[in-house]
Image (cartoon, helix red, strand yellow):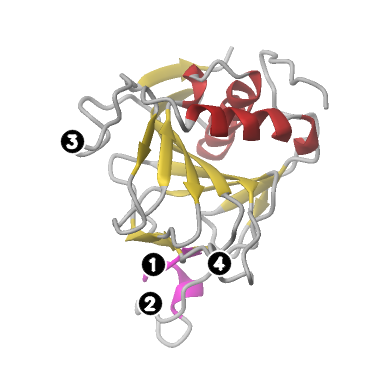
Amino acid sequence: MDTPTLVSNPWPVGQKLQQWAEPTVAIAQFADYSNYHNELHAAVLAQSTNPEFAKDYGANSDIGSEKIFDLPNWGSAAASLIHERARILFQKVMGSEAVAVDLSWASIYNAGDHCLPHAHPRTTSSVLYMLDMGNPSDADHGRFCFADPRMKMCCREEPGYMSTPCAPNLEPGMMMIFPGQAVHFVSTYDGTQPRITLTWNFNIAALPGNPLPEGTRPPGKQKPRTDRAS
């Protein structure tokens, strides 16, 4: 596979965005993902043993997966490329040249890992990228779902009452942006190969303070950054 070359605007020419069932959720499918997925996959696994970036929360925690923080500092061209694409997606959807990255991380789900319902504090929009779906026994194991009473798709019985978690059909190479306030979860994964996603929390302006609760930050020194399109 070709090594991705970073350019000032790595957004593919003619790249389309599709609105999902909710107006606050948009998805991009990158057709060229096979050019950089091998390198990106290798970068995630390599950094998963680096204590500067990695922290394993364990299957018994609310988070229930391993996190590898601070993608742009991994020293990987593929990680830097997908980071730029996530940043540009936020700019396009929000209509803002300014963008601040509050937190970025990869999640590795092994058998038994999950993530309980939660939202992302300090976050205007989150971006999720599907790198590797692993090999679950069925599509409902390890699935990303929204469970938010503000989303019509989750309230099929009565408006305002969450009755039905709703799940976009994410595939490798897909990048989705959604509100940081949206409640979501990942169901228990049961595959024998790792399920890997990448996530970013974005704001228009950088926020002060630690984006993670005290005591949960890995040894690395990731700080909020403010970027502008070149």
Residue mark closest to the camera, 2 vs 4:
4
Could you tell me residue 198's position as x and y percent? 53, 40
| Mark nearer the N terminus (3 vs 2) | 2
**Disc 4 target residue:** 167
- Residue 208 percent location from the top left of the image: 22, 25
In the rendered structure, the answer to whether residue 195 lies left or right of residue 160 reads right
Look at the image and say whether residue 153 sits in the magenta stretch: yes
Q: Residues within 10 Å of mark 3 (few under 14, many from 20)?
A: few
In the current view of this chain or complex, which residue is farthest to the bottom? 157
Amino acid type of disc 3?
Gly
Q: Height in image: 157 above or below 20?
A: below
Tell me the distance, in whole angstroms, between the alpha carbons under discs 1 and 4: 12 Å
Return the residue at label 3: 215
The picture quadrant where one finds residue 140 is bottom right
Of marks 1 and 2, which one's residue comes earlier in the chain? 1
Residue span colored magenta:
145-155
Q: Earlier in the sequence, mark 3 or mark 1?
A: 1
Count neighbours of disc 4 (C-alpha within 10 A) and say few if under 14, some if 14 to 19, many if 20 or more.
Answer: some
Foreground of the two, 184 or 134: 134
Name the one closer to the observer, 88 or 41. Answer: 41
Secondary structure beneath dot 2 equals loop
Q: Nearer the viewer, mark 3 or mark 1?
A: 3
List the residue tagged with mark 1.
148
Helix, strand or loop at mark 3? loop
Residue 127: numbered disc: none
Q: Which residue is mark 2?
A: 162
Q: State which tag comes first along the sequence, 2 or 4.
A: 2
Q: For this view, does 82 lie left or right of residue 190?
A: right
Mark 1 near mark 2, Cβ–Cβ under 8 Å? yes
Find residue 44 and report its image quarter.
top right
Residue 185, compared with residue 224, is above or below; it is below
